[in-house]
Image: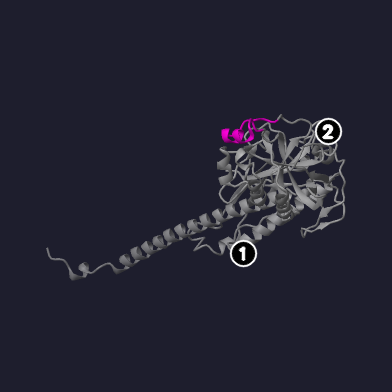
């Protein structure tokens, strides 16, 4: 049977319709993939923003104000508002690059720790801090950047990202990292935990019997005005420990020379130094060895310490009431032969715990000694390690960690 030629002509209308539908589906799929990728990018950027804002707020929260005497609740509230402002400034920088949701003050949430009656200032410091970046309704800035948003099924992009930072001050020890040395000065401060001896840390600083004559302003300059934070006046004594006497102390045998001690003051305890100690961590409590530099070394010591004025540093506390006896171990047979017998080693000090302080002033005291004025401070360092949850709270040294 022979067909009519008119029946063999293509159905032009039907082919055109299927082509249009195919194109529409392709455009929709491309729009869907592009918008999904774009929103994924915004969510990732929002999370980075929340993390950066949380760390910034935590660093702003941990400052020397928490050590002031007669600290009042409105001062704590002012610190929290400053935290929110600093975090908002960081979020604003992120929003310059991508249209992520804004950060509001109530998006920063504090989880307050239980108050410590021995350290009342810690009641104003949270154990954790959350920052939330979210949009609860259609965000015009996001919708305007979507590709055929309504057509592809996206009316607006939902973003809800939370970052938490943990504030830990239960110090077990310190661990150096690449390019991050432990900011510790090997000069030990006398202490009497029972507060029976004067010119010791607990009595002078924590019982607030010290003077209050110096302060550090926002520019970092030391001024002769009080700031409600006490100071302790110490003399670096190279002969004998005791109240009011700061001692040069080596954290391990490889650093018992004066040259090694000067290096630690200048650079802190690096990863290589820690490896030389043969330990993975500088722990507290511990034993330290007294170091007695020469007169020439003391001039160099003054120079190194002058460069640290106003800078936060970690100092160990030693027990000023007790000291272990001198020992003969740690010396070679050659040493004994030269001296005709056992060579007594340097005195050992019992290092109790670390604190953070600033050198406020420094001057020579006589021909041999150096006098310092120290003021406690608050600092955070990633080298701080906390392995035991029931460690005593340390109001001076903190670790800020972004929770997973």
Q: How many marks overall?
A: 2
Start and end of the magenta stretch?
326-343
| The one of 285 and 56 positioned closer to us in this rendering | 285
Question: In the rendered structure, does residue 208 fall within the stretch colored magenta?
Answer: no
Label 1: how many residues lie within 10 Å, few (<14), some (14-19) or many (20+)?
few
Which residue is rendered at x = 66% and y = 52% of the image?
Answer: 266
Describe the element under mark 2 as helix, strand or loop: loop
Q: Mark 2 = which residue?
A: 195
Tell me, yes or no, whether the highlighted magenta stretch contains residue 331. Answer: yes
Give whichever of 260, 315 is nearer the camera.
260
Q: Answer with the quarter of the image where residue 85 lies.
A: bottom right
Task: Indicate the position of residue 95 as horizontal and vertical percent values.
Answer: 62, 61
The residues tagged by marks 2 and 1 sit, at their Cα atoms, a distance apart of: 54 Å
Q: Closer to the N terminus: mark 2 or mark 1?
A: 1
Q: Which numbered disc covers residue 96? A: 1
The N terminus is located in which quarter? bottom left
Front-lying residue, 320 or 325: 325
Up the image or down, 392 lies above or below 98; here it is above
Q: Residue at x 21, y 67 (%)?
A: 7
Task: Identify the residue at horizontal 56%, vertical 49% (top origin).
Answer: 178
In this picture, residue 214 sits left or right of residue 98? right
Q: Nearer the viewer, residue 388 or 359?
A: 359
Q: Is residue 129 left or right of residue 120?
A: left
């Amino acid at each position: 049977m022979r067909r009519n030629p008119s029946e063999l002509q293509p159905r032009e209308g039907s082919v055109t319709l299927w082509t249009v539908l195919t194109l529409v589906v392709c455009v929709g799929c491309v729009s869907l993939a592009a918008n999904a990728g774009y929103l994924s990018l915004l969510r990732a950027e929002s999370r980075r923003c929340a993390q950066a804002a949380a760390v910034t707020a935590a660093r702003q929260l941990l400052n020397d104000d928490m050590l002031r005497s007669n600290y009042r609740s409105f001062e704590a509230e002012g610190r929290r508002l400053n935290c929110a402002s600093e975090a908002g400034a960081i979020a604003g920088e992120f929003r310059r690059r991508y249209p992520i949701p804004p950060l509001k003050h109530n998006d920063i949430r504090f989880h307050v720790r239980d108050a410590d009656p021995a350290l009342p200032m810690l009641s104003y410091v949270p154990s954790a801090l959350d920052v939330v970046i979210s949009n609860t309704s259609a965000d015009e800035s996001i919708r305007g950047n979507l590709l055929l948003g309504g057509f592809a099924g996206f009316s607006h992009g939902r973003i809800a990202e939370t970052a938490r930072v943990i504030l830990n001050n239960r110090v077990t020890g310190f661990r150096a990292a690449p390019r991050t040395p432990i900011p510790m000065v090997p000069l030990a401060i006398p202490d009497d935990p029972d507060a029976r001896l004067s010119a010791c840390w607990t009595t002078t600083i924590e019982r607030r019997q010290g003077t209050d004559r110096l302060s550090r302003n926002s520019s970092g300059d030391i001024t002769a005005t009080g700031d409600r934070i006490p100071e302790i006046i110490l003399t670096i004594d190279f002969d004998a420990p005791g109240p009011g006497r700061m001692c040069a102390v080596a954290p391990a045998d490889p650093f018992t020379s004066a040259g090694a001690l000067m290096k630690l003051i200048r650079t802190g305890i690096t990863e290589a130094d820690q490896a030389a100690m043969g330990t993975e961590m500088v722990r507290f409590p511990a034993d330290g060895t007294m170091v007695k530099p020469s007169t020439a070394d003391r001039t160099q010591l003054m120079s190194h310490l002058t460069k640290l004025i106003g800078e936060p540093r970690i100092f160990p506390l030693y027990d000023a009431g007790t000291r272990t006896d001198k020992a003969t171990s740690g010396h070679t047979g050659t040493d004994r032969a030269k001296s005709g017998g056992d060579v007594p080693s340097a005195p050992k000090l019992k290092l109790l715990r670390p604190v953070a302080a600033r050198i406020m002033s420094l001057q020579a005291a006589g021909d041999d000694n150096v006098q310092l004025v120290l003021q406690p401070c608050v600092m955070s360092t990633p080298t701080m390690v906390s392995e035991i949850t029931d460690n005593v709270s340390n109001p001076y040294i903190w670790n800020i960690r972004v929770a997973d």
